Image (cartoon, rainbow, N blue to C red):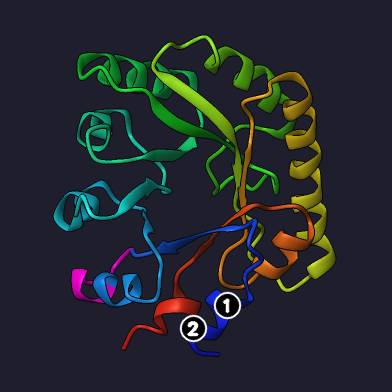
Amino acid sequence: MNPVKIIQSIPAQVTLIAVSKTRSIEEIHEMAKLGISTFGENRVQELKQKYDPAYHWHMIGHLQRNKVKDVVPLADMIQSLDSLPLAEEIEKQCAKIDKVMDVLIEVNSSKEASKSGVAPEEALSFLAVCMSFPHLRVRGLMTIGPNIDDQEQIKACFTSVYQLYQEAQARWPQIDTLSMGMSGDYEIAIACGANMIRLGTILFGERN
């Protein structure tokens, strides 16, 4: 499927993040011509190299504390907040430049040891703690589905995070973002309640 058809198929209430990791700035400019204005990067070095203020940039990969100072001036959102020390460092670096950073709490919905994120049963208590930081604006939750073919298991993971999202919304009116779904499972994610998806390969094509 070509990227234009994919973009046109996304419901209006769902925000599309184009995952531009390993992609050139030229490819990003071409994608922008199709109406996409927000790009997601996994690596801090790539974000620094490609940064263009014409676009919005989300940090979607695991973020090390020693790299926070480089991300904070450039990113519009950090989607991978997964620990208290990281929250404290984002707060510290944002305070230095008087910036309030939009963040999402990353939930390890599949409970895989190889994935980052807080445990689902700890997500709301961690979210509550992060709410206390003046330079963090907690917007919601993010998760990465399990890399498997079993659609029911993927759906179960997404549904569990959607339920957490609903609980968070009931407690905190500012919660408005549920980021889940990538190239292989974004349709399941949307059906389960995602209002933000992160698409890379399906938009840009396979790497040569």
| Magenta stretch, residue numbers | 21-27
Q: Which mark is residue 17?
A: none
Q: Position of residue 174 (x, y in %)?
A: 62, 26
Classify residue 62 as left or right of residue 26: right
Amino acid type at circle 2 is Val
Residue 15 higher or lower than 175, as above or below: below
Q: Position of residue 146 (x, y in %)?
A: 66, 59
Q: Which mark is residue 8?
A: 1
Q: Position of residue 2 (x, y in %)?
A: 50, 89
Classify residue 175 as left or right of residue 32: right
Residue drawn at the location 55% of the way across and 47% of the way down? 115
Q: Is disc 1 placed on a helix, strand or loop?
A: helix
Residue drawn at the location 28% of the way across and 77% of the way down? 30
Q: Quadrant of the C terminus?
A: bottom left
User: In terms of image quadrants, where is residue 18?
Assistant: bottom left
Check residue 172 for magenta coloring.
no
